Amino acid sequence: MRTPARLRERVGGVILVVLPLVFLGYFFAYPLGAILSKSLLQAGRVDLTPFADVFRRGTLRNAIWFTVWQATASMLLTLVVALPTAYVFARYRFPGKNLLRAAITVPFVLPTVVVGTAFLALLGPTGLIDLSGTVWLILIAHVFFNYAIVVRTVGGFWANLDPRLEEAARMLGAGRWRTFRTVTLPLLRPALAAAGSIVFLFTFTSFGVILILGGLRFATIEVEIWRQTISYLQLPIASALAVIQLVGVTSILFAYSRYQQRRMIELPLRPAQEVSRTPRTLRDRAIVGITLGFTGLFLGTPLAVLIERSLRTDAGFGLAAYRSLATPTSALFVPPVEAIRNSILFAFAATVIAVTVGMAAAAIVAYRTGLLSRAFDVLLMLPLGTSAVTIGFGFLVALGRPVDLRTSPVLIPIAHALVAIPFVVRTAVPVMRSVKEKLREAAAMLGAPPSRVWRRIDLPMVFRAGLVGAGFAFAISLGEFGATSFIARPATPTLPIAIFRLLGRPGTLDQALALATVLMVLTALSILLIERFRFGELGDF
């Protein structure tokens, strides 16, 4: 006969497995299955007509082609522009290095709507240079958005490469450029491939930046899914495009995995503290100064212009744009300030859902072994590789039965939680696995039951990991735009939705800039919270 304590543990274990499975099954796998059914099945039979229509229409073919080449160009530009900064952070020690590294990460976590609005203020019709209507505006914004990926991924790897390999090449007569091309660059390939694949994935599924800066002229697959659904009600076409995009994303992930397996080699690595050096010569100081100056100018100017434009009035600087947020506007059914309240409420709800489901799933991945743990690990990463637009579109297609949830505002935090759950899991799993088994064994030998062992040893660290995951979920929910654009009702706009609608109406640009600044501040506060509770360097994000 089982004791009540053992029975409770067993029930708790079952709940940990069932909760994420039911949530992801109904709100992720079921909508994706509905999209597949919508695109492949007509009257119970396989029908490929929607796919034929996609490739027959010139505008849709152009959207697929533009998606691929702008993602390729954005990836290459980001690697080239950010590589010098990665080198400086890897090879030099200078005051404020950790603070600057954290500051470089801020653009990456900003909502796409804020980035788009900032570049519109800087390089739009009323900006310093007018690049509106050109693809350069999109490419530059993508570089700004993904700069931190290259600096942190490539720079982190570069910081541990043994510099004696380069010194040996120099002693044999190779110049600096030849040493970099024949020694350093081949060693950096795994990190460059990792950073490049992530940047390509993010720009391949870019939505907010493209829609704000490119409009329908530079439509990508994401934008066409949105347009075919919202404007034309062509659900089979939108479903076919979503499937094509899923195939593209899966192919990218598969190609990256294969490349890493083939290129997996052991390298002589050294601690970063031993590799980096203080810039002493004039040349070293010039390299560090010019690189950091460019980085600060490139990443700081759009945000500074955004704030400056939100404060500018006809009579000078003031808070007129912020005060006008309480005034109803024709672009929204409610005063813009209502969007702030909606976003905060939805973000709290999404955080609760994401942390509850994500921490349960993380416990399975971290504490269990074998097939169940590996299957959960893969399953939980799938929402990260699926575009938010596809998730929102899947909700519209699938969640009409048995209860019609498509017009319910509860779908908004659920969609946000789906996007945030992988971040919660990847933050919590390394912390859970870091707890030494000897501590648990010692407590058990002293007579503590498993529940008390977990409460006294694991919980303090897991709690902090949960707070970090909650910060990520809150920030992601605040800035989520793709899925929300499908399911948000006119009376309950979120901040990104309100900003997008205000940008599309003449005479409301100042309000859009003020809302974008508010959203930027709220997101930055969430990131500060994350850094406050982060447990050392553990956690993948």
Image (cartoon, rainbow, N blue to C red):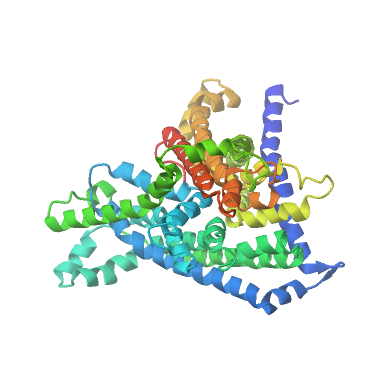
Question: In the rendered view of the protein, which quadrant contains the N terminus?
Answer: top right
**Residue 370: image location, x then y, percent:** 60, 48
Residue positioned 53% across, 51% down in the render: 113
Can residue 127 be seen? yes
Determine which quarter of the picture holds residue 38. Answer: bottom right
> Is residue 378 or residue 50 the one in the foreground?
50
Q: How many marks?
A: 0
Residue 243 vertical position relative to residue 54 in the rendered view, above or below: above
- Describe residue 176's horizontal placement relative to residue 217 as left or right: left
Residue at the far left in the pictured view: 281
- Residues 525 and 193: in front is 525
Judged from this view, the residue extending furthest toward the top is 447
Q: Is residue 222 above or below residue 23?
A: below
Which residue is at a point 76% across and 66% down the rendered structure image?
236
Above or below: residue 3 compared with residue 83 = above
**Residue found at the very far right of the displayed protein:** 43
State the image coordinates of residue 79 (x, y, percent, origin top left). Answer: 38, 63
Q: Visible in this render: residue 365?
A: no
Query: In the picture, residue 408 is in which quadrant?
Result: top right
